Amino acid sequence: MRIEINGGRVIDPAQSLDRVASVYIADGVISSVGTAPSGWRAERVIDASQRIVAPGLVDLAARLREPGLEHKATLESELAAAAAGGVTSLACPPDTDPPLDEPGLVEMLKHRARVISKAHVYPIGALTLGLRGEALTEMSELAEAGCVAFSNADMPMPDTQMLFRALQYAGTFGHRVWLRPQDAHLARGGVAHDGEVATRLGLPAIPVSAETIALATIATLVRETGVPVHLCRLSSAEGVAMVREAKAEGLPLTADVSAHHLHLCDVDIGWFDPQAHLMPPLRGTRDRDALRAAVVDGTIDAICSDHAPVDDDGKQVPFGEAEPGATGLELLLPLTLKWATEMNVPLMRALATLTTAPAAIIGIEPPTFRTGSRADCCIFGATDHWTVSRASLCSQGKNTPFLGLDVPGRIYYTLLAGHVVHERADRATAARP
Amino acid sequence: MGASRNPQLNASGDLTHLLTLEGLPADVITHILDTAEPFASISEREVKKVPLLRGKAVFNLFFENSTRTRTTFEIAAKRLSADVINLNIGASSTSKGETLLDTVDNLCAMDADLFVVRHAQSGAPHLIASHLAAMKRSDVHVVNAGDGRHSHPTQGLLDLYTIRHYKRDFRELTVAIVGDVLHSRVARSLIHGLTTMQTPDVRVIAPRTLLPSRVEALGVHVHNDMHEGLRDCDVVVMLRLQSERMKGALLPSAGEYFKHYGLTADKLAAAKPDAIVMHPGPMNRGVEIDSAVADGDRSVILPQVTFGIAVRMAVLSIIASN
């Protein structure tokens, strides 16, 4: 299939390219940008005028809920959501049921994803068996099956010696380790940020020290072992400051933040809105502002969707009993664009936090428009606004704190290896001035 | 962000549910207290019933055990001539897997007019109120009878009633709340009530393990020392200490707690000579309060219980009439 994407503004962070040009795709790879290859005859022409043509987005945290949690979502529904969100590559955490701690589970997941073929799926293997923090998994076997990194998902490592050993073992074979910094004990029983809102509402709280103590532990062990660690979903100003300092010291750390946490804080819990029950918890405005600034200055490398489809049964219960999480794949680009606009961040830089930076963290080739690269890309209107509603989401998880919100960034096409996997027929809803 | 509006007042500012005292306007609180006054004297009458809620079905929906609150709500509703149905859900449907909102929908189908809800989770009554709004059931009302650590508004109101009864003007008082503020919905409700009524000095007295972080943001002065905290108080409110908190990470023992924070005649001497002593009950004698004080002439703990019925009658009748 030969596809020609005409007249769009091509932004490619991998080669700092930003210009209006046509993109020529043949046999699943980029043939050229700007000038048509000799003898070019397109089988399909996509009009991208007034739109951005960008590499496919890379998401560091998208729960697909398979295996075991198909009542919440399936690969079919969530990979369709990825395509609708312009996401062509995604890492999925191991917190499935059972967790991704056996090669067979990983192979099945990879196989299913290949059959559906709407996004490239990169499983994160469980760091410990059953995510229980008691015994190491067979990391090499899991890596052969397709795991790109290892993590204990949202389950904190209860035992520092175990964490130390896990880093040593993973480091021996060059496996990547991703950790969400949260102290198991200080976070126990908590459902909201320890601050005025939790005090007012009488919600069991998670102090910022749950994050900073875990960060101090991780930084110490990274310094000791030299093993690189990716820090998942920072939530606090103090945490950001520690990561900034550790990076300045030269420790091999990278970090991400969820797109939700760039916009929301604990006040958004309102009167116990279960939609705002997220993990890590939404913290104070000061924390949110520090996170927003940390992505600008590069302390935080990447923005992720922290996609967690939760069914209505999981949310239509009191706040403390509600399942944490929100659907995010289709909001990743809009929330990032909203952050970029509000912080005066150029589009090139904003797209880097969704493409080159997360690709480097996963350890895959960055999506790009270089000749010969796999043609993963998306076409969107950066200033086309839409209203988030249950009906507007492809994900089976319809729960998000952004329901009803007007957001910028409408995806019109997503191409995976040169195939159109998402397409919106209608021309832009009226662009805002 | 659908749950962001305080859902207890309707568009014209009338009370349609009672979920929390936070954000409840002072004139609404005063109206409830004034309405309770004549009900307080009903108990002295030969015939204790009035027909204000005749034909209404009041469901006591208790997901957590309670004797006192449930009983006083039941008496209040019966004195208003309502039909009262008591449901101890802790022992029935949720243990069969029914969700909170399924239970509510079922009871609505049985023509419930008003739910009195107690739940171990903060915010459960808000969830029910939001659900009723989504179902367009503005004819069904919710009264919070205690949710988790969050709120116990009728207790807060009866505490305000008691304070007004003995001390008259909220704007001249110093009130100390002593004990487990961290886990206490009673404390949170009373704090909101008193600050709304412009009480100038509301104090909390507790060890730091029993205070939530940033509690001063609620408008209270924090004391860790009992003698200092009780100095020149007009009202002393003792909180119940749950037995599971007495030993462990929060406190070493009931004995040491009593030594520092148990209310004795000696400690009470720091308060004003006419200070009253309150307790939401049930009391742990010898843990948070000495029997000599609990039974002493400054204790208004039993009148609180009596006023509680009148205040709950006022709340039920006001909500049912809106």
Image: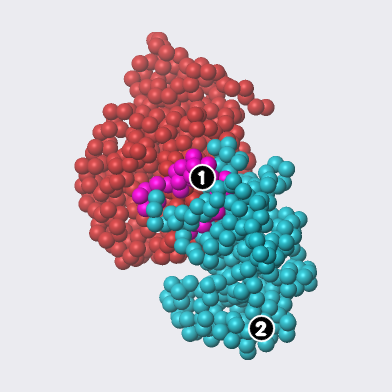
Question: Helix, strand, or loop for circle 1?
Answer: helix
Under mark 2, the amino acid is: Asp
* Quadrant of res A56: top left
Kindly identify the residue that appears in the image at 22 percent across and 44 percent down.
A103
Letter of the chain that mark 1 sits on in the rendering: A
User: In the figure, what tint was chain A given?
Assistant: red
Kindly identify the residue that appears in the image at 24 percent across and 37 percent down.
A108
Letter of the chain that mark 2 sits on in the rendering: B
Residue beneath disc 2? B297
Q: Residues within 10 Å of mark 2 (few under 14, many from 20)?
A: few
Query: Which-is-in-front pick, marks 2 and 1?
Result: 2
Does residue B158 appear left or right of residue A402 in this picture?
right
Rendered location of residue B204, percent (x, y): 63, 73
Kindly identify the residue that appears in the image at 43 percent across and 51 percent down.
A232
Does residue B26 appear left or right of residue B16 in this picture?
right
Q: What letter labels the chain drawn in cyan? A: B
Is A355 situated above or below B191? above
Question: Helix, strand, or loop for circle 2?
Answer: loop
Kindly identify the residue that appears in the image at 63 percent across and 54 percent down.
B80
B107 drawn magenta: yes
Q: Which residues are magenta?
A: B94-122
Residue beneath disc 1? A275
Assign the C terminus of chain A to one quadrant of the image: top right
Q: Is residue A97 visible?
A: yes
Rendered location of residue B289, percent (x, y): 56, 81
Q: Name the residue nearer the viewer: A371 or B113.
A: B113
* Quadrant of res A229: bottom left
Colouring rule applied to residues: by chain
